[in-house]
Image (cartoon, rainbow, N blue to C red):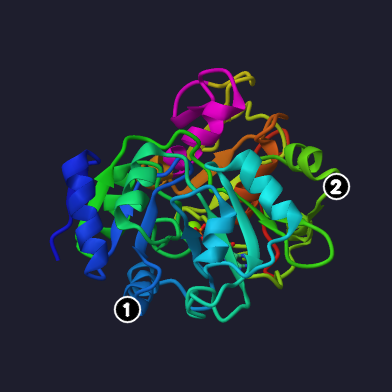
Amino acid sequence: METRTLPANPDALTEAAQLLHQGKLVAFPTETVYGLGGLAENLEAVRAIFSAKGRPSTDPLILHLSQPDLSLASADGWVASPLPEAALRLAKVFWPGPLTLILRRGPKVHPEITAGLDTVAVRCPAHPAAQELLQKVGVPLAAPSANRFGRISPTDAEAVRQELNGIIPLILDGGPCALGLESTVVNLVGRSPEILRPGAVTQAQLAKELGQQLVSRQASLKKHEVQPAPGQLVSHYAPQTPLYLCEAPIKNLSPGAFHIFFRKSHQPTGGKSFLLGAEGNLDSAARELYRALRKADSSGAKKILIEPVPEGAWAEAIRDRLGRASSGTAHWDGGAWKFFPKEKP
Ligand code: AMP
Ligand code: MG
């Protein structure tokens, strides 16, 4: 199949909506990462998403809504009613935006979208092209990130092409993603709200709106446990080249490796490298992280070394992704680099 990339202008968006109504898949920009969309009410399209990604049927998709008003989604049968107060509150404050809510599944949602779970993930994206596409389509799109399963999420149209060329008919190019890391996922089904995946919307912002602290499910990732919830795999978002998390800022280069620095540290010169957050903040580091990992992957380096993540609003989300992407840790013992593989879960 020929894959075309078109700038996300009104004509291309109209064509994309037509393809989607024919049950085809379209990659589109969002403010987090690029999504691979299919019509949520078309089971063939939903199945095509899993097969295009090589994604196991046990990993559920996120429903993308055109309207930030959750009560419309429940009236239309996509999420169950009554809606929890907390859901209405968070949608009101953070939508459209990088927050995914886990709610009880409505009768319209085919169980294959949710990997058989009775819960469904919903989000209303803020990117203008995503908004326009969803409005033209008129029904929710099921859309995971537009990468092959387990690989790095794409943050520009070229990265989508590297992942899905020849597999889908159309990529809408809306430029580089403004945020660059996947949405925060909050589970609102159960006794107390919990964060399943950290992202741009932080624990502190959520706690402030809900008036209570949220449990972080990914805490146990540090112990390399297998996660009970879907999409919580310890190894995920991974480059093909082994990635090692350095215990301290890199003062000495590792021969043949690709080095990823954070702006604040004192960097040795030479070798293959990427400076994250060159604009001076973690926002830009988050935005560039996946691009850096892709660059490292295509550099021919045998290993990727990355410095510790500096403190800041994005630190938790970046550490979460790096923890899953990494093969282990690296330590400079004063004379040489030592590498410690991650325990297999
Ligand atoms: P992606 O859009 O590729 O980041 O994938 C969607 C992710 O959303 C999944 O991998 C899960 O982490 C999460 N997710 C989707 N549906 C559910 C659900 N019903 N329960 C918990 N997590 C979910
Ligand atoms: Mg993904």
Q: In which quarter of the image is ligand 1?
A: bottom right
Whether residue 171 sits left or right of residue 145 in the image: it is left
First to last magenta residue range: 269-293
Vertical order, 74 against 195 (above or below): below
Q: Does the residue labelled 2 lie within 8 Å of ligand 1?
A: no
Q: Residue 44 carries which label?
A: 1
160 part of magenta stretch: no
At horizontal 33% and vertical 69% (from top left) the residue drawn is 52
Residue 272, given in percent of the width and then of the height, sits at 43, 32
At horizontal 26% and vertical 71% (from top left) the residue drawn is 23
Whether residue 133 sits left or right of residue 212 in the image: it is left
Question: Where, by quadrant of the figure, is residue 156 drawn?
Answer: top left
Q: What residue type is labelled 2?
A: Gln
Is disc 1 surrounded by few (<14), some (14 to 19) or many (20+) residues within 10 Å?
Answer: few
Nearest to the observer: residue 147 or residue 307: 147
Nearest to the observer: residue 164 or residue 108: 108
| Disc 2 secondary structure class | loop
Vertical order, 133 against 58 (above or below): above
279 part of magenta stretch: yes
Q: Is residue 239 visible?
A: yes
The residue to which callout 2 is attached is 213
Q: Which of marks 2 and 1 is nearer the N terminus?
A: 1
Disc 2 versus disc 1: distance between alpha carbons? Answer: 40 Å
Residue 327, given in percent of the width and then of the height, sits at 60, 56
Question: Where, by quadrant of the figure, is residue 75 drawn?
Answer: bottom right
Question: Where, by quadrant of the figure, is residue 16 drawn?
Answer: bottom left
Residue 308, given in percent of the width and then of the height, sits at 68, 35
